[in-house]
Image (cartoon, helix red, strand yellow):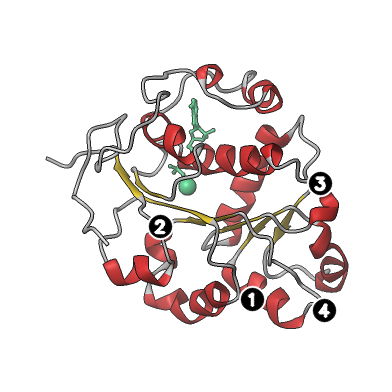
Amino acid sequence: NPTPPPTAEAGRAADGGFSPYAGCKLFRQLPISWKTKDGLAPKYKEMSDIQRASLPHSLCGRDILGAAKTGSGKTLAFIIPVVEKLYRARWVPEDGVGSIIISPTKELAGQLFEELKIVGKHHSLSAGLLIGGRKDVDAEKERVNSLNILVCTPGRLLQHMNETPNFDCSQLQVLVLDEADRMLDKKFKGELDAIISQLPKRRQTLLFSATQTKSVKDLARLSLKDPEYISVHAES
Ligand code: ADP
Ligand code: MG
């Protein structure tokens, strides 16, 4: 497993992973569905640096370790490949959980769910926001196996893994850890390890955070496969 280099030129993965779409500047130039393009178009036209640098790779199914400062648009950098992967696989609600996006707080999970609604507007995928503190956990348990994309906090996801009869994530295609540096921190270690141990290893994994995770041990925990290390704010 290679040690991640500290920084990389924007637009190109540090270890030289190649994509014919590496030079694209606009969302509409990407190899993505019209459904996704139509969702993005009213609000988003030009890609931000982290989106330009990572999407050409994440859209080919590669694992990503992406770092870019807060406010740089990391959310779309993982939501677009999640939606495209399931769309290309012709995923339907009956196929169950195809992607899990984990965020450290309810507030962040709520914000990224809003972004998912924009990208998913013209798609027929089902999605749910599973966060703590809501009373309707029993209703959620009925629904959770018919949701294609779960946006969740670690505690609530684990609660479903432990308590929801027949909770099934054996078909998981894409796992996303938002704020990955926080998620890999001591505070979430127990919960995250318990979650990861129940997920299929054969999947795409996307990690995004404000700082680059350098611990090879953390990456091993997540069984990343030959990930692209992408960092778009060289600190010099
Ligand atoms: P981060 O997760 O890196 O902190 P967000 O994904 O929350 O950043 O995005 C920050 C803000 O930038 C959001 O309001 C989002 O709508 C906006 N944004 C993201 N990508 C673009 C883009 N390509 N063009 C214009 N605005 C964008
Ligand atoms: Mg974010």
Residue type indicated by callout 4:
Pro
Distance Cα–Cα, label 4 vs label 3: 21 Å
Asked whether 203 or 39 is in front, the reply is 203
The residue carrying pointer 1 sits among few (fewer than 14), some (14 to 19) or many (20 or more) residues within 10 Å by Cα, namely: some
Nearer-N-terminus badge (2/4)? 4
Residue furthest to the left in view is 236
Q: Residue at x 77, y 29 (%)?
A: 122
Residue 78: x and y in percent read 52, 43
Quarter of the view holding residue 71: top left
Residue type indicated by callout 3:
Val
SS at mark 4 in the image: loop
Q: Which residue is mark 1?
A: 158
Q: Which mark is residue 225?
A: 2
Nearer-N-terminus badge (4/1)? 1
Q: Which residue is mark 3?
A: 92
- Residue 226 lies left or right of residue 77; in this view the side is left
Whether the residues at callouts 3 and 1 have beta carbons within 8 Å, the answer is: no
| Residue 150 appears in the rendering | yes
Q: Residue at x 60, y 60 (%)?
A: 106
Q: Residue at x 65, y 47 (%)?
A: 113
Q: Which residue is mark 4?
A: 165
The quadrant of the image that shows the N terminus is bottom left
The residue carrying pointer 3 sits among few (fewer than 14), some (14 to 19) or many (20 or more) residues within 10 Å by Cα, namely: some
SS at mark 1 in the image: helix
Distance Cα–Cα, label 4 vs label 1: 13 Å
| Front label number (4 vs 1) | 4
Residue type indicated by callout 2:
Lys
